[in-house]
Amino acid sequence: MKNIAVFTSGGDAPGMNACIRAVVRGALHHDVNVFGIYRGYNGMINGDIQPLTSQSVSNIIQRAGTILKSARSVEFRTKEGRQKAYEQLKAHNIEGLVAIGGNGTFTGAQIFYEEYGIPTVGAPGTIDNDLYGTDFTIGFDTAVNTALNAIDKIRDTADSHDRVFFIEVMGRDSGYIALRSAIGGGAEMAIIPEKPNSLDEIIEKLKIGWGRTKRSYIVVVAEGKQPGNATEIAQKVKKEIPDLDIRVSTLGHIQRGGAPSAVDRVIASRMGLAAVEALLSGKAGIMVGIVNGRIKYTPFKETFKHKNEQIAEMIRMVEVLSK
Ligand code: F6P
């Protein structure tokens, strides 16, 4: 393999740049040329492809976002779109790909690999931490730290006013940000898509907590299928317990920005280097992850499985530790 390309796709995540840097410098270390594909699969289709040098990735390890830009490509979902992408890669003599992204990215990569056989290795870049085959995805730790920072500040004002706050964090189908920031922020409750609570349950828990010792109450809510989840739940609760002084705070896209944490910079660098070396050693159709401190390769198809191992334990922790 003499020419490979790297791209980022889907929602950006802090640490993606550190990963790009590791892929580029790893490839150059092995005397392989490396191209950057801009704007994810859209750039592959449109030929938005440029050679990258060691200098191209200088001074980016500490920056969030992605120097290669990102997109959620609708055209790549079509056969015609993927055909155009294949032709562009051929025209640039690109023989292998490193894809940095989440489950949408790997779904596309798997289909493309099956259709055109271009070896592709993935690195998990998403704040959601919803990929099977890695303990942590790139960007998750920074997103949780951002959420925690906000929760701490909201707690200050919640406490002064004896208020209940519903704080919505990101994670479309995944409660990992919600659970981890609830534990770290000492929240009283976490509401997540993997184990949805009934309204009765939420009200019951609130009444018990409030009646006992609580004078401020933080409920961390994963956004669920669409943002606005926390607002909806808060309105229903207010209807049932009108005496509660309730406020809602939606953290939104601030969770995707900010300098990557040390954890994210290091795992992104490690996964980026491992991804490029896996590709050069002949591996394909897999994601590189880190499980129990070791590099692990997982076929793309398996990365979509739900990884519920720690969910039950984390829910229990929120309950026990908030009493
Ligand atoms: O990339 C993950 C994520 O941030 C999810 O947590 C969230 O549901 C979604 O992306 C938001 O996507 P967009 O930025 O396209 O609105």
Image (spheres, rainbow, N blue to C red):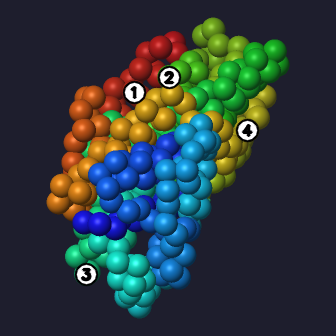
Q: Earlier in the sequence, mark 4 or mark 2?
A: 2
Query: Considering the numbered disc 3 on the image, is that residue within a helix, a strand or a loop?
Result: helix
Q: Which residue is mark 1?
A: 314
Task: Point out the image quarter for the N terminus.
Answer: bottom left
Q: Amino acid at mark 3?
A: Glu
- The answer to whether residue 280 of the structure is visible from this angle is yes
Q: Amino acid at mark 2?
A: Ile
Q: Earlier in the sequence, mark 3 or mark 2?
A: 3
- For marks 4 and 2, give the one nearer the viewer: 2
Q: Which residue is mark 3?
A: 115
Near mark 2 (Cα within 10 A), the count class, few <14, some 14-19 or many ≥20, is many
Q: Earlier in the sequence, mark 3 or mark 1?
A: 3
Near mark 3 (Cα within 10 A), the count class, few <14, some 14-19 or many ≥20, is few
Q: With 7 as the anchor, is 79 left or right in this view?
A: left
Q: Earlier in the sequence, mark 3 or mark 4?
A: 3
Q: Residue 52 versus residue 162: which sits nearer the camera?
A: 52
- For marks 1 and 4, give the one nearer the viewer: 1
Q: Are marks 2 and 1 in contact (CB under 8 Å)?
A: yes
State which quadrant residue 100 falls in.
Answer: bottom left
Q: Are marks 3 and 1 in contact (CB under 8 Å)?
A: no
Q: With 269 as the anchor, is 178 left or right in this view?
A: right
Q: Which residue is mark 2?
A: 183
| CA distance separating discs 4 and 2 | 19 Å
Query: Considering the numbered disc 2 on the image, is that residue within a helix, a strand or a loop?
Result: helix
Look at the numbered disc 4 and say if its residue's Cβ is closer than 8 Å to ligand 1: no
Look at the numbered disc 1 and say if its residue's Cβ is closer than 8 Å to ligand 1: no
Q: With 245 as the anchor, is 195 left or right in this view?
A: left
Residue 8 location in percent, x, y? 48, 59
